[in-house]
Image (cartoon, rainbow, N blue to C red):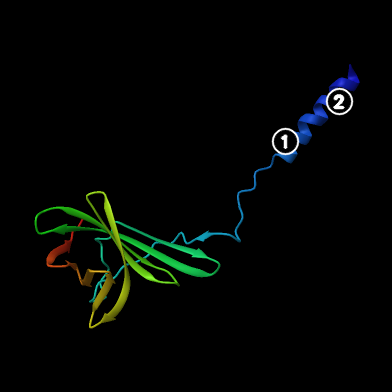
Amino acid sequence: MKKGFLITVSLISLSLISCKKNESGNKSIIKTDSSSTTIVDNNGKIDSSSVNSSTTIVDGKKTEKTDFVYKATDGALVKVVFKNDPKESTVAITSNKKTFTLPKKESKDGETIYKKDDMTARVKGDSLHLEQGNNIIELKRTKI
């Protein structure tokens, strides 16, 4: 009886000691920056219209993603995600369950141009000008 009780107590104490939770995780694979990313407009003022912004660091390389909601002249809402990573910068435009991802081609005079095939997006300040063939769509960033 005494021997069985001693074995049971020993097993319980060993299981409690060995099941210690490690909260640090594997830090060498992905690290996330818990600080918020501040987006500024062309005048250097803090832009409060960003919906979601995140910064991720993988192997010492920083990737930033910023989501905005734009409104077309016809009232339709469009989700626009700007992604900057060490390999390339892209803009992903989602409307009507379709997403178009365009790589950055150039930046000059406060305007950034993204282009893929026959689609071109020109971003300047709060406006986004989409061109596809003869179709032109004007989008304005909303304040949500």
Q: Where is residue 142 in the image (x, y as percent from the top left)?
A: 18, 58
Q: Position of residue 28 (x, y in %)?
A: 61, 61
Disc 1/disc 2 C-alpha distance (Å): 16 Å
Residue drawn at the location 30% of the way across and 79% of the way down: 106
Quadrant occupied by the C terminus: bottom left
SS at circle 2: helix
Mark 1 vs 2, N-terminal side: 2
SS at circle 1: helix
Question: What residue does disc 1 label?
Answer: 16
Q: Do the residues labelled 1 and 2 touch (CB within 8 Å)?
A: no
Residue at the far bottom in the pictured view? 109
Q: In this view, does 58 lie to the left or right of 71?
A: right
Q: Position of residue 12 (x, y in %)?
A: 76, 30
Question: What residue does disc 2 label?
Answer: 6
Packing grade of label 1 (10 A; few <14, some 14-19, many >=20) is few
Front position in the image: 2 or 70: 70
10 shown above or below 119: above
Type of the residue with mark 2: Leu
Front position in the image: 92 or 22: 92
Q: Where is residue 21 in the image (x, y as percent from the top left)?
A: 65, 43
Q: In which quarter of the image is residue 84?
A: bottom left
